[in-house]
Image (tube, helix red, strand yellow):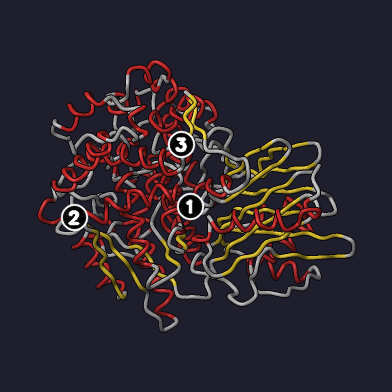
């Protein structure tokens, strides 16, 4: 994994001021250095500059980037963030066509493939990626992003210059690109946050390359191309064939994503998703005489305060213990304390460049910082719930009837603390509803499907483009901030394509949530783990945490220089802080309730201040 950045202006000649523009590339590299602490480099041509920081996973010695390849009068340069899991088979095919390689890296496979087949080669890639390729002969810059948006890629235009980077902070390292939040940005933060509209970067004029798309930049301007999208198709496999194919896809995805020149690990919560990934990895390593490292996360003394509810019916620790015994892994239990959780709230903003999932994100950031002391590559169970229908909103009647995002149906918690003049300028309900309806309208349909199945398809598409993307962003930023590569086997595009068209009666086999996934994993897990009731990522139940947050926010509001004063009504906030918080009614997803609202506001204040944001409202 790495960080990429660069710029292009077809009317410029960067070589006339080489030192200046190399200095800019260096600045863009340095603000993203956490993504690639092992190596860095840059490339400058007449009308294009590329920068790269590298985390060494494949071909540790020879994978330096930017990578340049010349053939006859043609010169191409590439910078790449991600992993191509089918790189060995692609390499063999290219070698049969006469290609010769100088390294063992997947970066060179992409570049050679592009130079032979053009942009269509991206369709052959199985992996997670953001890629920039400069074709000097064509005088074109191409920006590619993987099918599900696992790897980030943001861009902006300043005059005739296109500027891009893995993270938003990379754009702000370019001279003249300023952090501005307008009314649309406030709609994103308070109406949709911690989610954001796909294709948007929240800041004014900041965008992202859409998943499954690539941009083509040339003298005539910027063009957006689609190379992958979901389609509604009839599902023709029998139930037994569906189970077998699902099992094969999962096993193949996990095995492919074990590709690494350094040891891998897994995150293990004891739930069916992470346990299945762990079991497959452990068995493969046992064949090689190796033992898998696994990691689980919890909060200090959380067992004293844990309250079972509809969202979190049980603690994880007993289930983790069972899986460690079953898979014979080398396990490390990690815990986070209150003060670490609070201090990492602000580091999480630094990592994401935006207010995010409060302590749900800050805790993951803390845990990743500890995991990297043992391993630099890990596989997770993320995305299974979105793909296999594990969340409550796939099942609940009110979600089927609601005309808004099912994980954020009540807008009142989002509005109740904002100043009245802000609410007059930014209609949060209208902003959220418009975003929701736009996604519903573009959902790939299947002709002749009944209303209930069509609605489940809509909810599935919403999850893939919104909720799952938010979690993928969380996983990428929290891991890469510490120089850890986190892989997500369930986000293999083949699994997503197949499961999108599997009917609900199969996904929910025998009326059991994620019944298809459980049936597909019957040979890999103990029965009690396989059929454990879903329990999401852990959160702290310590009441002291909420009290510490309240004190922190009150201090912020007492400072006249605190930028959040422009947005939050102090009287409304005081009433809120003095009222009991309901842990059972989240305002986003399953985990973000009252305490997370306080934490989110602390993040907003820090973000406005640390990024020196100009508000245009």
User: In front of the other: label 3 or label 2?
Assistant: 3
Q: Residue furthest front?
A: 560
Q: Residue at x 28, y 70 (%)?
A: 332
Q: Is residue 126 above or below residue 103?
A: above
Circle 3 crowding by C-alpha within 10 Å: few under 14, some 14–19, many from 20: many
- SS under mark 2: loop
Viewer-closest of 503 and 311: 311
Per the rendering, the mark at residue 196 is 3
Q: Residue at x 24, y 50 (%)?
A: 539
Viewer-closest of 471 and 535: 471
- SS under mark 3: loop
Q: Is residue 86 above or below residue 412?
A: below
Residue denoted by label 2: 315
Count of all numbered marks drawn on residues in the image: 3
Quadrant for the N terminus, please: bottom right
Q: Is residue 270 above or below residue 458?
A: below
Viewer-closest of 278 and 175: 175
Between disc 2 and disc 1, whose residue precedes?
2
Viewer-closest of 188 and 430: 188
User: In front of the other: label 3 or label 1?
Assistant: 3
Rendered location of residue 209, percent (x, y): 60, 42
- Marks 2 and 3: in contact by CB < 8 Å? no
């Amino acid at each position: 994994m790495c960080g990429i950045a660069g710029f292009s202006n077809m009317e410029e000649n960067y070589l006339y001021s080489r030192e200046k523009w190399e200095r800019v590339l260096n600045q863009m590299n340095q603000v993203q250095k956490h993504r690639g602490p092992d190596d860095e480099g840059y490339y400058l041509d007449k009308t294009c500059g590329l920068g790269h920081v590298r985390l060494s996973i494949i071909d540790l010695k020879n994978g330096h980037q930017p990578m340049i390849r010349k053939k006859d009068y043609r010169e191409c340069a590439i910078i790449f963030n991600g992993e191509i899991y089918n790189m060995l088979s692609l390499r063999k095919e290219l070698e049969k066509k006469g290609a010769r390689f100088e390294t063992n890296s997947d970066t060179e496979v992409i570049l050679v493939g592009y130079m032979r087949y053009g942009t269509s080669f991206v369709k052959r890639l199985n992996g997670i990626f953001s890629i920039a390729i400069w074709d000097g002969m064509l005088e074109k810059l191409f920006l590619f992003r993987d099918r599900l948006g696992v790897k980030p890629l943001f861009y902006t235009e300043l005059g005739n210059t296109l500027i891009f980077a893995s993270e938003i902070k990379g754009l702000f390292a370019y001279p003249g690109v300023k952090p501005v939040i307008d009314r649309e940005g406030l709609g994103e933060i308070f109406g949709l946050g911690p989610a954001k509209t796909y294709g948007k970067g929240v800041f004014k004029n900041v965008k992202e390359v859409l998943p499954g798309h690539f941009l083509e930049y040339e003298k005539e301007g910027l063009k957006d191309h689609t190379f992958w999208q979901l389609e509604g198709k009839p599902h023709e496999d029998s139930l037994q064939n569906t189970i077998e194919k699902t099992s094969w896809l999962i096993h193949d995805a996990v095995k492919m994503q074990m590709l690494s020149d350094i040891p891998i690990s897994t995150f293990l919560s004891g739930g069916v998703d992470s346990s299945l990934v762990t079991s497959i990895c452990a068995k493969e390593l046992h064949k090689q005489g190796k033992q898998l490292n696994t990691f689980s996360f919890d909060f200090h003394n959380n067992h004293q305060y844990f309250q079972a509810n509809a969202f979190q019916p049980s603690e994880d620790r007993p289930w983790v213990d069972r899986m460690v015994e079953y898979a014979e892994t080398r396990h490390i239990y990690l815990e986070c304390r209150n003060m670490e959780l609070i201090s990492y709230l602000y580091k999480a903003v630094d990592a994401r460049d935006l207010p995010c999932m409060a302590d749900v994100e800050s805790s993951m950031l803390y845990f990743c910082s500890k995991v990297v002391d043992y391993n630099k590559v890990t596989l997770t169970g993320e995305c299974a719930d979105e793909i296999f229908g594990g969340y409550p909103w796939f099942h609940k009647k009110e979600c089927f009837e609601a005309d808004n995002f099912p994980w954020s149906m009540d807008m009142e918690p989002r509005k109740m603390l904002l100043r009245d003049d802000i609410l007059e300028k930014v209609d949060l309900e209208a902003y959220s509803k418009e975003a929701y309806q736009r996604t519903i309208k573009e959902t790939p349909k299947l002709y002749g499907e009944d209303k209930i199945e069509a609605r489940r398809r809509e909810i599935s598409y919403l999850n893939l483009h919104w909720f799952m993307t938010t979690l993928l962003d969380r996983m990428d930023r929290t891991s890469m901030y510490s120089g850890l590569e986190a892989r997500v086997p369930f986000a293999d595009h083949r699994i997503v394509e197949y499961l999108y068209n599997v009917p609900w009666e199969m996904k929910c086999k025998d009326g059991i949530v994620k019944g298809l996934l459980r049936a597909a994993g019957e040979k890999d897990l103990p029965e009690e783990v396989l059929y454990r009731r879903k329990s999401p990522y852990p959160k702290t139940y310590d009441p002291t945490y909420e009290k510490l947050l309240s004190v922190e926010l009150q201090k912020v509001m007492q400072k006249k220089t605190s930028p959040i004063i422009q947005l939050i009504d102090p009287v409304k906030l005081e009433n809120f802080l003095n009222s009991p918080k309901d842990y059972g009614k989240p305002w986003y997803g399953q985990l973000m309730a009252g305490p997370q609202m306080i934490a989110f506001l602390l993040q907003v204040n820090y973000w406005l201040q640390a990024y020196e944001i100009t508000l245009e409202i």
